[in-house]
Amino acid sequence: MDTTTIIRNSLLKAISYSTYRNLIDKYEAEGKSSGTEQTQDQVHYTALNQKRYKRLDKTIEIPEDKAQYFASYDKSVCLLVITESWCADAAQIVPVVHKIAECNPKLTMKLVFRDENEELMNLFLTNGGKAIPVVIFLDLEDKVLAHWGSRPSTATQMVAEEKAKNGKLTPEFKEELQKWYNQDKGTTIISDFIKILEEIKDK
C-alpha cells in the first residue's frame, strides 16, 4: 500500500483534539488507557497525563510574535498527530500543537492512536522504534510535507546524550525531562514548528 493510501485510511479514523481530550477523561474515570495493552503502568500514566493535559490546556500561551507568525501563515496544512493517552511526552507536546493550530483555521489538527494505525506508525519510526508523538505535516492532497517527533529538538538532544552516557533512560532522567518540559513551556516546540512551516511553505 502506498503512503498516501495509508494516510487517507488513517485520516478516516482521525479525531479532533476535543474528542481526544474527552476520551482521556473517560479512560481516567474507567481506570483504562488507550492502546491495545492495558497494563497497570499505562493506566497509571493515563491518569497522570490527564492532570498534565488539564494544566497545559489552561496555561500554555504562544508568545505574541510567534502567534502572529502562525496566524498569518497562508498555506493550508493538516497536522496529523500519532499519539496514545499513556505517553508522557505526548501529554507535554500535544496541548502545544493544539494551541498552534488554534492560531489559524488553515492549520488543522487531527489525532490518531498509534496502536490502531500500525501501517502509518511504521512510516514514521524513530531509530527503528515506534516513539510517539509524531506530527505529520500534510497538504490538501494528503501528501507528506514533513514530519516531527517524537520530542522537541532540545529534548531529543538530551535523550541522545543520556543514552550515550548510561545506555538507557533512568527514572531520574525521565523526571528531569518532565521538569525541562515544565520550564520550557512549549518554546522549543513552537520554534521547531516555525522552522518546519518555513521549510515547507513553497512545497
Image: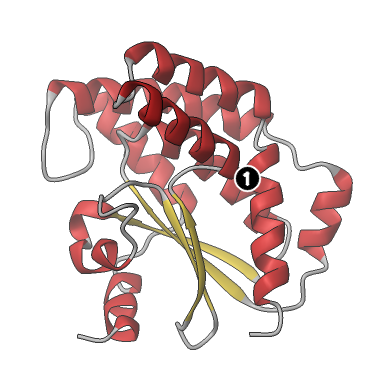
Q: Residue 143 at x, y = what percent?
A: 46, 83
Residue farthest to the front? 165
Name which residue lies at 27% across and 61% down: 121
Quick check: 66 above or below 23?
Answer: below
Name which residue lies at 42% across and 41% down: 21
Q: Residues within 10 Å of mark 1 (few under 14, many from 20)?
A: many
Judge left or right: residue 70 versus residue 4.
right
Q: Give whichever of 134, 20 is nearer the camera.
A: 134
Q: Residue 52 at x, y = what percent?
A: 49, 25
Residue farthest to the top? 172
Q: Residue 51 at x, y = what percent?
A: 45, 22
Quadrant of the image containing the N terminus = bottom left
Colouring used for the render: secondary structure
Image-quadrant location for residue 142: bottom left
Q: Residue 98 at x, y = what percent?
A: 58, 50
Judge left or right: residue 123 versus residue 182.
left
Name which residue lies at 66% across and 29% down: 184
Quadrant of the image containing the C terminus = bottom right
Name which residue lies at 39% across and 41% down: 22
Image-quadrant location for residue 33: top left
Q: Give whichever of 71, 154 is nearer the camera.
A: 154
Query: Which secondary structure, mark 1?
Result: helix
Name the residue carrying label 1: 189
Quick check: 4 above or below 125?
Answer: below
Which amino acid type is shown beneath numbered disc 1?
Answer: Ile
Q: Give whichever of 139, 178 is nearer the camera.
A: 178
Quick check: 140 above or below 179?
Answer: below
